[in-house]
Image (tube, rainbow, N blue to C red):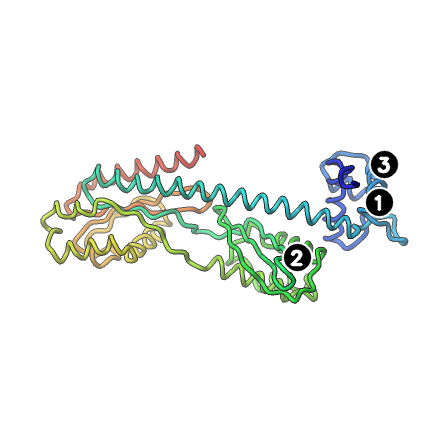
Amino acid sequence: MADQELDERKIKILHAIIRNYLETGEPVGSRTISKYTDLNLSSATIRNEMADLEEMGYILQPHTSAGRIPSDKGYRLYVDTMMEEKDREIEELKELMIEREEKVDRMLKSVAKVLATNTNYATMVSAPAIRTNKIKFIQLSRMNEGQILAVVVVEGNVIKNNVIDSDGSIDDETLLKLNLLLNTNLCGKALEEISLAMITAMKQQAGIHSEMVGNVIDAIADSIKSEEDLQIYTSGTNNIFKYPELADSRKASDLINTFEEKQMLTELVNDTLAGEEGSGIQVYIGDETPVQSMKDCSVVTATYELGEGMRGTIGIIGPKRMDYEKVVGTLKSITHRLDELYKKK
C-alpha cells in the first residue's frame, strides 16, 4: 500500500503542508515548508519529496499555482494520525491520573492518621483541587452524524468531556480548522482571560460554523465551572474526648457530626485556600473559625501543593490550649514532605 511508503520525513512535510494550508488557505510551496519544519532540508529536497507526495495522491497542484494543497487522501491520513496521537495522549493522561489519584488517596489517608496519632488531636486533609483552570489543549472529534465530542484538558491534567450537537455538515477539513482555531486562541488561557472580543474574532474566523465555536466555549465554561465534590479525609475524631472542655455531650456530638458529614469542613478548606493567598500556616482561635461547631476549638491549617495549581488543606483541630508550637512545626514538616514527594515524581 502507498501508506507504507511514507517515511517520517514525508509525513512531516505532509503535515507541514496541511497545517500551513489550514492557517492561510493558500497553496504551499517548498520554500515555505523549508522555513516551516525543523528538518533542515533544502528547497530542492523538499520539492522532490513533494513530487513524491503528489504522485502518491496526498497533495494536489492547482493549475494556477506552483504550490500544493492537500488532497482528501492527505487530509484523511492527517486526521487519522492526529486523532490517534490525541487519543493515545488522552488515554495515557487518564491512566496516569487514575494511578496518581489512587496513590494520593492512600497517601492523604495516611497523613491524616499519622497527624492524629502524633498530635492527639482531630485532623482533616482535603484532596488537592484545581485552583486555576488554564486550558492545556482541546480536541474535537466526531462521535456520530449529529454530535461532536469536545475533550478539554486543563492544568493538573484534568480531563473534561463534553458532547456538543452539530448539524452534521462538519467535514474532516472543517473539524481540523476548528481544532486549530480553538487551540491557537485558547491554549494557556484561564476561563476569565477569554474575552468577548476574542470569542467574536474566533466566530468570524469560523464563518458558517461560528455557532459551533460558541457551543464549544460554552461547554468549556460549564465543565470548568462545575465544582466536583471535595474529598476530605479525617482521623482522630475520638481524640476530642481527651479534653474535658470539648467532651461535653452536645459539643462533642456537634464536632463529631461535622467530621462525619464533612460539608462544613469544605468552608474551612475554602477559607484556608483563599486566605494568605493560599499559602502558609493559618491559626483560627474560637470564633475566628468559619465552622460553627468549632467555636470552642483552635484550628491550625496549612496549604500543600502538588504542582500545576493542585492545592489542598491540612487541618489540626483541638482545644484552645493546644500545643501550638508542636502543631505548627508538624504541619510545616508534613507540607514540606508532600512538596518534596511531588518534586520527585
Residue 147 is left or right of residue 126, and the answer is right
Q: Tell me residue 245's x, y (percent).
A: 10, 51
Label 2: which secondary element: helix
Label 3: which secondary element: helix
Q: Residue at x 14, y 56 (%)?
A: 251
Residue count near mark 3 (Cα–Cα under 10 Å), binned few <14, some 14–19, many ≥20: few
- Disc count in the image? 3
Q: CA distance from mark 3 to mark 2?
A: 33 Å
Question: As shown in the figure, which amino acid type bears the numbered disc 3?
Answer: Ala
Q: In the rendered image, is residue 13 in sight?
A: yes
Residue 161 is left or right of residue 335, and the answer is right
Residue 332 is left or right of residue 293, and the answer is right
219 to 330, vertically: above or below: below
Label 1: which secondary element: helix
Q: Residue at x 33, y 44 (%)?
A: 280
Q: Residue furthest front?
A: 1
Q: Mark 1 — residue?
A: 54
Mark 3 / mark 2, whichever is N-terminal: 3
Image quarter in which the N terminus is found: top right
Q: Tell me residue 310's x, y (percent).
A: 42, 46
Mark toward the viewer: 1 or 2: 1
Q: CA distance from mark 1 to mark 2?
A: 26 Å
Q: In the rendered image, is residue 301 in sight?
A: no
Question: As shown in the figure, which amino acid type bears the numbered disc 2?
Answer: Leu
Mark 1 / mark 3, whichever is N-terminal: 3
Marks 1 and 2: CB-CB under 8 Å? no
Q: Tell me residue 66's x, y (percent).
A: 87, 48
- Tell me the number on the disc at residue 44: 3
Q: Quadrant of residue 163?
A: bottom right
Q: Mark 2 — residue?
A: 178
